[in-house]
Amino acid sequence: MCVVLGSEGAMPCLLILQMACETECRPLGVFKCQLCALTAPYSYVGQKPPDTQSVVLLEESYVMKDPFTSDKDRFLILGSRCSLCSRLVCVGPECSIFYSKRFCLPCVQKNIDAFPQEIRQDLEKRKVPSKRPASQPSSRT
Ligand SMILES: [Zn+2]
Ligand SMILES: [Zn+2]
């Protein structure tokens, strides 16, 4: 372990850390939500992120290492594909829901009758804050 501070030992330690990161944290590509503007580099796609012992995800997901911690077991789920239209969507509440599979919100709205009451109510709740005209030019001259 590298706890050597302020001596010659510090430099090689830094180098090793950087090299390890280059091979481990190299992103596979950039995840892009097709409904909102979210983009983020992902480092794994699938159901079992590397370095996690017991984690199995319920769906094939785009995963990145949690950049806010050095803990190897921590990762963030960015999003996954809609099981109906296979659009790539993030897990944000305005883009998709997970109901045994991943569904993007446009697909949910199209097939709302197929979803149970609780999902419908949940969606109603989500819709409320964004019921405002986007722009109202008020130019009087
Ligand atoms: Zn999104
Ligand atoms: Zn969809």
Image: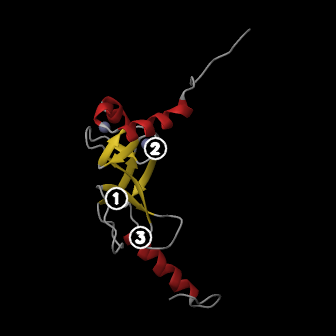
Mark 3: which amino acid? Glu
Quarter of the rendering occupied by the C terminus: top right
Quarter of the rendered image showing ligand 2: top left
Q: Residues within 10 Å of mark 3 (few under 14, many from 20)?
A: few
Neighbours of disc 2 within 10 Å: few (<14), some (14-19), many (20+):
some
Amino acid type, residue under disc 1 in the picture = Leu
Confirm or deny contact between disc 3 and disc 2 (CB under 8 A). no
Residue 8 lies, with reference to residue 51, above or below; the image says below
Residue furthest out toward the right: 141
The nearer-to-camera label among 3 and 2 is: 2
Q: Residue at x 57, y 86 (%)?
A: 10
> Residue 136's image quarter?
top right
Gap in Å between the C-alphas at discs 3 and 2? 33 Å
- In percent of width and height, residue 64 lies at 41, 60
Residue picked out by circle 2: 93
Q: Which residue is mark 1?
A: 28
- Residue 24's spot in the image, x, y percent? 38, 71
In 3D space, how far apart are the residues under numbered discs 1 and 3 (Cα atoms)?
12 Å
Mark 1 surroundings: few (<14), some (14-19) or many (≥20) residues within 10 A: few
Q: Nearer the viewer, mark 2 or mark 1?
A: 2
Label 3 sits on residue: 22
The answer to whether residue 62 is above or below residue 128 is below
- Residue at position x 56%, y 90% from top? 9
Amino acid type assigned to the residue bearing label 2 in the image? Pro
